[in-house]
Image (cartoon, helix red, strand yellow):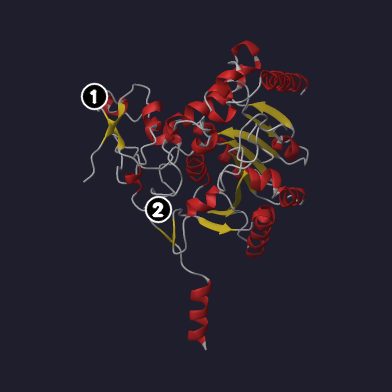
Amino acid sequence: MVNVMDVREEEFINPGTRMCSGCAMALIYRIALKALGPKTIITVPASCLTVLHGMQGFCTTKVSVLHTPFATTGASASGIVASLEEKGLADEICVVAFAGDGGTADIGIQALSGAVERGTNFIYACYDNEAYMNTGVQRSGSTPLGAFTATTPGGKIRPKKNMPKILEAHGIPYVATANGSYPLDLYEKFQKAREIKGSKYIHILSACPPGWGYDPKDTIKLGKLANDTGFWPLYEIINGKLIISKDSKKYLDPSKRKPIQDYFKAQKRFNNISQDEIEVYRRNIDDLWNDFKRRLESQ
Amino acid sequence: MTDSKKDYQKILASVQKPVKGEAGKTGTWSNFKPIIDLEKCIPAKSGKATCFNCWLYCPEAVVTRTIPPKIDLDYCKGCGICMEECPVNAITMEEVKTE
């Protein structure tokens, strides 16, 4: 486990970005860049992250960034990797695609699946704020059941898409989930992913104050609550082997998990969630962790 | 010919400079600013390089990892995450009057 003093002190984002106050994604991006270091090329589709990079003439980051259309994140990463291989720089420079949940689960899934299937040597990081936050909170494939968005005023009636599972089915060497509230865990995962050859996928839960409806100061607390209730487990799958991360390990015991209502009560988007939906959540969380338990025992 | 080619390239590939405060002085977004009580703050009190939760969790990278930690109020958006994450409650959000 890395210590706070092991984290690189150098900053790769300058202060004074356009992100909302209390944005977990800004924290995730800051920590990820620290782990990746200066020899990194980032490719970004349309998302809140595009806004972070600023307007023409100026930028906020000290690493190279390529802005790409919504559907082509995976393809553009493949292109960058191919050109680096041609120039003999592929071992030196790390290519990272950084996309939101809409750009990953909905619009960009085809390009992502293709790039991963080709075994492109890159990291795909998805920061999941569970809706199209940049355009005004519209529902995405990653929005959880019962959540209010601009296009699901009565609460979403379909469950959240399990992206890490889809990527795992591609048989890639590294799949991980992370959470903005655990920056040291996040740092470690990015460092680990950088050392592995092949396609790597990291799915990061990113709390969003205006979209989820809570006070900006509670960003970290809310992310921790998602872990404590068992809603967002932190794990890694390295070459098919499941490892539950340190911060989530104790929740294999159901009695240690907090009730899921605690997580819903803290956010305005779950104001109208019904008792039936809460029951569905409770069942799903139990199933998820039972699956983990069985898998850990069998491997 | 070479000059015009250079001009052409200049227009196509505009130089993006990394700057501080791309969105202006974001410190003006909120009147509430974090103030560190150095008598409570762990690194300031003990003189050892530990804790630094305020530095680690700051989304805006305005806190420094120094003893004592310093906060750049010109760019701090006043979200209050550092106040919540300080283990000894050394940080309070106070209204800073701007002229």
Within 10 Å of disc 1 (Cα), the crowding (few <14, some 14-19, many 20+) is few
View extreme (left): residue: B99
Asked whether residue B40 appears in the rendered view, the answer is yes
Picture coordinates of residue A95, whole percent (x, y): 60, 52
Picture coordinates of residue B3, whole percent (x, y): 48, 85
Out of A115 and B98, give the one closest to the viewer.
Answer: B98
Q: In whole angstroms, how far apart are the C-alphas of marks 2 and 1?
A: 34 Å
Q: Which mark is residue B39?
A: 1
Q: Is residue B21 above or below residue B54?
A: below
Secondary structure of the residue carrying tag 2 is: loop
Asked whether residue A247 appears in the rendered view, the answer is no
Picture coordinates of residue A172, whole percent (x, y): 73, 41
Which chain is disc 2 placed on? B
Q: Which mark is residue A24?
A: none
View extreme (top): residue: A255
Residue indicated by mark 2: B23
